[in-house]
Image: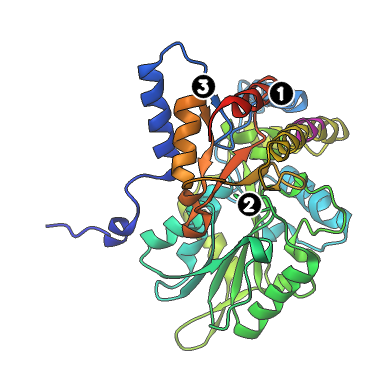
Amino acid sequence: MVEINSGYLDLVPNYLFKDIADKVKALKSSFPKAEIISLGIGDVTQPLPKVCILAMQNAAAEMGKIETMRGYGPDFGYPFLIQKIQKNDYQDVGINIQEDEIFVSDGSKCDISNIQEIFAKNIKVGITNPVYPVYRDSNIMAGREISFLPCREENNFVPEIPEEKLDVIYLCSPNNPTGTVFTKDELSKWVEYAKQNKSVIIFDSAYKEYITNPELPKSIYEISGAKEVAIESRSFSKTAGFTGLRCGYMVVPKGLNGYTENGEKISLNKMWARRMATKFNGVSYVTQRAAEAIFSLEGKKQVSEIITYYMNNAKILKQALEKMGYTVFGGENAPYLWLKVKNGSSQEFFSKLLNQAFLVCTPGSGFGSEGEGYIRFTAFATRENTMKAIERLEKVKL
């Protein structure tokens, strides 16, 4: 008899977005000619930047010649991409990050879930509520004790500093699902808490490029002392449309340490490097060349145009929802809108939208108990579908 990992038994039966996909599939089966519009899952609808397409075409051509083809690449990413990340995302904004502190990966979701492997099973993990499910579910799978940090309207969906000691804390800004963003003062309090408690912050800044307010931090390393306590995860998925390519990176500073049972200090950078070298063979050369192209002048221009497109969707949708009398958060420095439901539960609101208007949202309860009473809309749609969604919302009885 092979004993299973019982942590999996503590999960809800279906992953949130798989459950939504199944319900949409069932509706399509009943109404095959219906046009179902999704403002639910945060998948992109705009094509890849042209510079990325050209870069991939050139890289693919290189792979077709014996003189320039490549096999396994460097475990942590090709230097040509790491150096671009180092310069553009950090050095150019006054943050000192070294090349060997950057680890190129196949996206934030994998990094966020895999990073917990380097920590002991008996640690106490702090996770915001509501939250992107992978933070919670990956730690439940590992059998860890989780302390949920409520994020409510009265505190602008920012988690309060706990009185208890937490070992690892997951923070996300701009936040998915609420669309809110940490101020420097709020983030500074968490960095100070982590320093006092020898904790580690896992900071997800996958949506950093959507921040338009210059006063709001795009990186936790803008906060003094953060490199002593924080790991940062970033993605190209929602900024440059890489959801189908898969590429992102994680920063693990060399000054960040964990401890053995005996109190011996251990470099988390070295541990993560060992884990990556053992369990990951790197992102494809073709994909990394596409990611490199994002940092060219033309690449930055094209990415900016894509982000502006989505944020205009968010602005149009938010204004329309507020005109209908809804209370809406987010949508200004993030591509997500967090709508307060007027009547009933978030699941009831979701079902009514789906079945009456053929419109998909994400029920807030799927992000945690504090998400009850809210639903999430995404700006990742075409302009045409965003306008159609507004028309349907105006007609449906909610």
Where's residue 322, x and y in %?
Answer: 72, 40
Q: Residue furthest left?
A: 1
Q: Residue furthest bottom?
A: 262
Q: Are marks 3 and 2 in contact (CB under 8 Å)?
A: no
Q: Amino acid at mark 1?
A: Arg
Estimate the spatial distance between the alpha carbons at disc 3 and disc 2, rounded to whole Å: 24 Å
Q: Is residue 13 above or below residue 150?
A: above
Q: Is residue 74 above or below residue 258?
A: above
Report crowding for label 1: few under 14, some 14 to 19, many 20 or more residues within 10 A (C-alpha).
Answer: some
Q: Quadrant of the N terminus?
A: bottom left
* Residue bearing the label numbered 2: 178
| Of callouts 1 and 3, the N-terminal one | 3
Q: Amino acid at mark 2?
A: Thr
Instruction: Please tell me whether mark 3 sits on a helix, a strand or a loop.
Output: loop
Where's residue 360, x and y in %?
Answer: 52, 31
Where's residue 338, x and y in %?
Answer: 63, 47
* Left or right: where 152 falls relative to 4: right
User: Can see residue 252?
Assistant: no
User: Can see residue 86?
Assistant: yes
* Residue bearing the label numbered 3: 36
Q: Report the magenta residues as a range.
A: 305-309
Q: Which residue appears at 71% of the width and 23% of the height?
A: 383
Estimate the spatial distance between the alpha carbons at disc 2 and disc 1, rounded to whole Å: 22 Å
Q: Are marks 2 and 1 in contact (CB under 8 Å)?
A: no
Q: Amino acid at mark 3?
A: Ile
* Residue bearing the label numbered 1: 383
